[in-house]
Amino acid sequence: MTIALKRVYEAAEDSDGYRVLVDRLWPRGISKVNAKLDLWLKEISPTTQLRKWFGHDPAKFDEFADKYRKELDGNTEVVDKLVSICREQPKVTLLYGAKDPERNQTVVLKDYLEACLS
């Protein structure tokens, strides 16, 4: 089982496996057909309040990550759903719209899921 991260604006590939969009808002400029999603799991994304507070400010990332993990701890039903998908699929690609590939919610979510699966 592999969990990969990919920006939703990058072309879909067969090697992506099961594609899950984990953003609360639909990404601008992407049609639902072109996104080629298997699932849009917006309920696993950070709350609107946390997302707006973070504002993709790199200086806030560590604190954002801590707060997001706490939200995930309280969101067991949705987390369990994604953990089950990860157990069932050989590869799951978490899709995101953020421009920064190193400081966004999918980085935190991937680590969180891997801890759940170990």
Image (tube, rainbow, N blue to C red):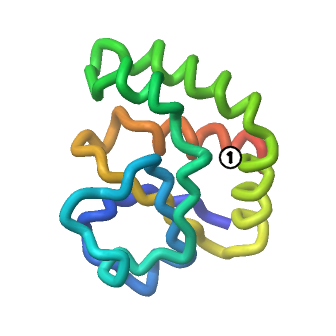
Vertical relation: 6 (above or below) 75: below
Would you identify the image quadrant in which residue 87 lies?
A: bottom right
Vertical relation: 55 (above or below) 98: above
Q: Is residue 118 visible?
A: no
Is the N terminus in the top left, top right, bottom left or bottom right quadrant?
bottom right
Looking at the image, which residue is at 41% across and 29% down?
51
Instruction: Where is residue 13? Give x, y as percent.
Output: 37, 82
Task: Using a 10 Å C-alpha cutoff, classify the residue at mark 1 as few (fewer than 14 neighbours), some (14 to 19) or many (20 or more).
Answer: some
Looking at the image, which residue is at 44% across and 17% down?
62
The one of 100 and 27 positioned closer to us in this rendering: 27
In the shown orientation, is residue 107 left or right of residue 2? Answer: left
Looking at the image, which residue is at 46% across and 20% down?
64
Give amino acid for label 1. Answer: Glu
Looking at the image, which residue is at 46% across and 38% down?
105
The one of 26 and 15 positioned closer to us in this rendering: 26
Q: Is residue 100 visible?
A: yes
In the shown orientation, is residue 68 left or right of residue 115? Answer: left
Instruction: Where is residue 46? Give x, y as percent.
Output: 52, 34
Q: Which residue is mark 1?
A: 114
The one of 104 and 28 positioned closer to us in this rendering: 28
